Structure formats: C-alpha cells, structure tokens
Image (cartoon, grey):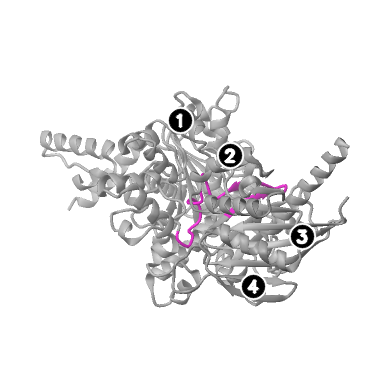
Amino acid sequence: MEDAVRFLPEFNDMTCKVLDRWTNELPEIPHVLFCDTAFFSGLPDVAGTYAVPEELREKGVRRYGSYGLVHQWAWEKARSLFGGNVGKMVSVYLGDHTNVAALRDGKSLDTTIGFTPVEGIPSRTGCGDIDATIVFELHSSGMSFREINELLSRKSGFKALLGRRCSYSDLAAGPATVGNAAARDILIYDVLKYIGAFTAVLGGLDTLAFATRHPDESMSLIGEICGRLDFLPVKLHPHSSAAGGDAWNLSDNGARINVSLFKSDIWKIMAHLAESLIEEKQP
Amino acid sequence: MWFFLNILTFNCGSSSLTFKVFSVDQAENIRVVLSGKAHRVGVTGSRPSSIEYDHGGNRASEETPLDDHGQAAVLVINKLGELGIKLDCIGHRWVHAAGHFQTAWVDDALLLRLKALVPILPVHHPAILRVIYACRKALPKLPQYVTADGAFHSTIPACACTYLLPKGLVKKYGFRKHGFHGLSYRYVVRKIVENLGIPLEGSRIVACHLGTGGSSAVAVKDGESVDTSMGYTALSGLVMSTRSGDIDPILTLYLMAVYGYHPDDLMDMLNKKSGLLGISGFSSDIRDIIQRVGEDPQAKLAFEMYVYRLKKYVGSYVAVLGGLDVLVFTDDIGVHNWLVREKVCEGMDWCGVRLDAEANKRVSGDEIARLDAPDSKVRVLIVPTEEELVICWEGIALMKGKKDAAAVRS
C-alpha cells in the first residue's frame, strides 16, 4: 500500500494513516480494505494500455479506472432486476465525479477514468480529457509540477467553467437553474459520447445502468440522455420514476434495451462486500 | 474579366512539399495543369532529395539538394517559368490559425499574425513561412493567400470544444479544441454529397482521415463539423503512427516529477516515439505491423489499439449525432488499408453499418467507392482526399471578391 501512495498521494496517504491507527487501536477486529481500482485490474490490454513507449509503460503508466465498487455492484443489481439478462452493459455513475464503464458478463472492458481520476468526464474540480500538450505549455510558462497538478485536479472542472462551487445536485437540478446550462450541456454531452464509445466497444448495448446517490434529482438528466439515445433504441417508460426502494427499471414495456437506475450508497456496498468476505473466511 | 485563372497551391508536410497548378475557366471548371511533390526536404539521409513533376501525364523526377521548403518552392516556380505557365495567385495551406482566419490574402499585417503562430506548430509553420517568403522574393507582385486547415472545425459547439480549465488561463493561452485535417474533411463532405446525391441538411456523417503521419475522426452534421478527435494540438485523439493520441494529462506530470523526465524529452517521446511505434517497438508503419500481427504480440496489440481507439471515436460520434447515415474513410491508410476498415466496421450492426467484405478487399483506393453491403443502413465509402483542390476553391472565391471590389471601385 505504501508503494501505491505515489499514485494518488492526497487519498492513499490518508488511507494508510487511518488504517495504521485503527489496526493498532482495534487489533482483534478484522479490517478489510476495498480497492476502487481492483475491478478494473482485469481490463483488456487494448483498453488498459496507453500508446506510449515501453520505457514509459513499464513505470506503471496504464489505465487503472476507479469507482470499481459501484460499477461491480451496479452489475449485480442489474442482474437481479432483469433476471440475469444483462448482456452488454454500459454503467454510468452520475455524481460529483461522473464516470462510465463498459461491462460484459460482470467483467470490466473499459472505463473513462484513466491513470488518475482526472482523465475522463470533467468532475466538480477535475478537468477531464484535455490535450496533454497543455501541461507542457503551463510548465514552460513557469508553473511547477505541483501547481499544475493542483490546477488540473482541484481548480478545474465545473467549478472553473462556472467560476463558483458547483455540486452534482446543482447540475442535475435541471435547465431551469440559472447559469448552469453550459455545465449541464457538457455533462450530458460527455456521458453520451462515452455511452456511444462503449457501445461500439461492446458491439451493441443490452443494458444501460445509471447509479447515483441522488436518484430523484437525476431523473431529468437521465431523461435527456436517454432521449438522445432514442436511435439505439433506448426507450424510457413514460411514467418512470425513482420513488421507493433503491432499484428501478426505467425502460418501456417490451423495450429491447434495459434501462435501470440504482441508488448507490458506498457504505452499504462496502458493508455488503465485507459481509460476504467474512462469511467466506469462516470455517 | 478573366477567362482562365491559374492558381498554384502549396501544401507543406514536415519533410515534403506538395504542389498543384489549377487552371479555372469562367464556368469554374477546374483542371490540373501541373502537379508534383518535393521529397525529403531538409532531411539528411542516405537517399537524396528530389522533386517529381507531372505535367499533363508527362512525369519526371529530378534529384536535387533541398535544404528547406523555400528552396523547393523556388525550383517549382522556375519550372513553371520554363513551361510558360503564368500564375494569377498562389495559395498556401496554413495548419493552425487559432481561429483568427479561414482564408486571407498575405500582406505584412497577416505575416505578423502568422509569425505569432509559429510556436503552436514549430515544425510546419516556419516551413510554410519560408515558402511564402521565397514566393514573394521570386514573384513580388503576385498575390498570395493562406487557407487555414482548422477553419472547418470553427462550427464545433461549446460543449465539444471547451476544456474545463480556469477561465483566465483559457483566455490567456487560447486553450480549446481546434481540430485539424479541415481541408480534407471539407473536400470529403462535398464529394459525398455530390456522389450520393444526398442533401447536406439532416445528414449525419462520420469521417476518418487516416494518414501515414497524423490521423483524426470528425462528426459532421448538416455538413458542419460538430466534434473532432484532435484537440488544442495534433497530439490528442486517435493512436497515430508516432503520436500517442489521448492520454491522462497527469501521467506526464507523474513521469516528470517522479522519474525526472525533462519536459522537452517527454514531449518528444509522446509526439515522435509513441503511437504505433511506441506500442510495437519496431515500426510506425501500419503495414509493417499488420505483417507481424501473427507472430509478435506487441504488433498485435499495436494494431488492435489502433482499431479500438478509432472504433470508440466512431461510436461516440454516432451517439452525438443521434445515428449515422454515412461512414467514410480517407487519406492513405483510410483508402488503401482494407483490414483497418474491415476491423473498424466489425460488430457495428448496432448503428446500421454493414460492410461488403468482398468489395472492401477489391477496391483500388484510387477513386471514390461504395463499400456497404446491400442490407446496410449506413453508406460506407472511401474518398481519396485532395486538400489542394480546397485551397484552389478558396482562391477562386478570393479572386472573385477581388474582381467584384475592382468593379465597385471603377
């Protein structure tokens, strides 16, 4: 774990310290560590490799992905919701760090997050996909590596676009919210692009699964995204809603492509995973 | 009043210079009078530099030292003198105008502006400037103009061309998606419309410009570019022969901060040693790589990644366009490599693409051809591109404007 700190110092270092403290304080209790990139460790080379020389690749430069716990769990949920008929699935996590994954038979084929969580769809403060030449221009203008890192991961994204704090709930709230339209357009556009890209990778689409902490607020966003995928054809049920429970089938009766929405709760997911892990360990 | 207009066009590559002389009559019928290419300009190597000419089917190739692009241009102008071809204007392809112009006459003010754009493309732009200055010196009275390659992408909406970086920086540096291969895409879109007889209005086209150097893809709606894979520079997007295409920007910081790579060296590696060459480890040429796919796992990975990345872009553009009417391949690899096309179209039934496998293999690549199967909803084509002709179209429009202005003045 300590070796991995260098990849994401802000988070991994803290995790190490927390773990250190609690394993000391509560040595008799089993401590379980869930790695958010583990689900993507089996990414096919074609998706996990960057097209750079071997000299750079052997330094650990590859696509690691993240939010693996959520996507894996979304697949399990979809399986129980659609009676096992999940097939080719695109899983969309909507939140402050929206990201998309392509799944087949419960295995990950590709994802938007890359070497770090900065790549992919812009987040609340992360820039998302940009031309890497920009890093070099900023450096030659006198910025340090640390400053550029800070800039791209903490001072960019929707915050930079709107010039103020902007949470996912603000964006999801709908086009009526004054001044958020540009950010909302970009979010919808980027999610659409990746749904298209991953549909191509999968060779078609059977299940489109959305997961979010804010299901109710997300309905209009999901409606807009699905409306533009009408040609696939993605057909939403006209009266679909996210009321009661934590899993909803949004697709129209008889629609060929399943559309679902899950309320994602990372605590519940971890509790569930810990439970099954401990059950496995019991003699 | 003119009956014939002779336009010389120059298209600078990093180590080549393509030229064409077009003769345009009053009805705007366009004929190529002379064409050719200077090879290995400014390259020191075992093989000598040369210029090849094609004058109405008479082909000749002359070995001659070529220190820079300006020298090559002078030789072309001398050749025109020998052949008695009189020019009315000279047009140049300008690669990256940062949104300042589409087509413009070259004057002192414009030259200042062009010089300011040198740092964005330190290889191509100085070469083009050398050609412009050489022409000015040789033919001081002849009007020259530049046509910006990226202008076709000026229609890309904000949601597709904005980088989400602090606004002050975006403004200061002009960080946004610019896109490239615009001349090629303009030509291809016009040819598709002519050839298929479809209206531009409502058409949804994805075009893939697959060159031996750079490659990109574009989404075209109603004849206008709405998204493209290259970005602020030509580094991002597809896996190219030696360019990496899309990468996580942070990985560059990681390599510089943790492993001490010098920014210049790393930039060089991403532009000149990555892509197909970086993955395969032995060649930047997709043909070499395809030959070794069977025995070399790295060659196999390089080929698969090339196709995979392209497929992702095609898929994302289909989603953005809300469906697809035409898929088109252009430039060297696009028109000549049947295996790339076959693999890209594989499993694309979901958006209505079905390739006629036999036609795809048989096609010569020298002319426009349909490759879709009878039951394909999407029309699949190859269109050999002709960037110089687009420069010529722009020249005709400029000369007309000049004539109109003269008429108003008199």
Q: Could you say where residue B192 lies in the image, as x and y percent from the top left?
A: 73, 59
**Residue count near mark 2 (Cα–Cα under 10 Å), binned few <14, some 14–19, many ≥20:** few
| Discs 1/2, front | 2
**Do callouts 3 and 4 point to residues on the same chain?**
yes
Q: Residue B166 carries which label?
A: 1
Per the rendered image, the range of residues in magenta is B217-242
Up the image or down, A26 lies above or below B24; here it is: above
In the rendered structure, find residue B86 and report the number of the disc placed on it: 3
Q: To which chain does the residue with label 2 belong?
A: B
Label 3 resides on the chain identified as B
10 Å neighbourhood of mark 3: few (<14), some, or many (≥20)? few
**Does residue A143 appear in the picture of this structure?**
yes
Q: Do the residues at discs 1 and 3 belong to one chain?
A: yes
Give percent across and percent down for residue A230.
65, 46
State yes or no: discs 1 and 4 in contact (Cβ < 8 Å): no
Is circle 3 on the same chain as circle 2? yes
The answer to whether mark 1 and mark 3 are in CB contact below 8 A is no
For the residues carrying marks 2 and 4, which lies nearer the camera in this image?
2
- What crowding class fits label 4: few (fewer than 14 Cα within 10 Å), some (14-19), or many (20 or more)? many
**Left or right: A280 with respect to B365?**
left
User: Mark 1 and mark 2: span between their CA atoms?
Assistant: 26 Å
Question: Along the polypeptide, which appears first: circle 1 or circle 2?
Answer: 2
User: Distance from label 3 to label 2 (Cα)?
Assistant: 29 Å
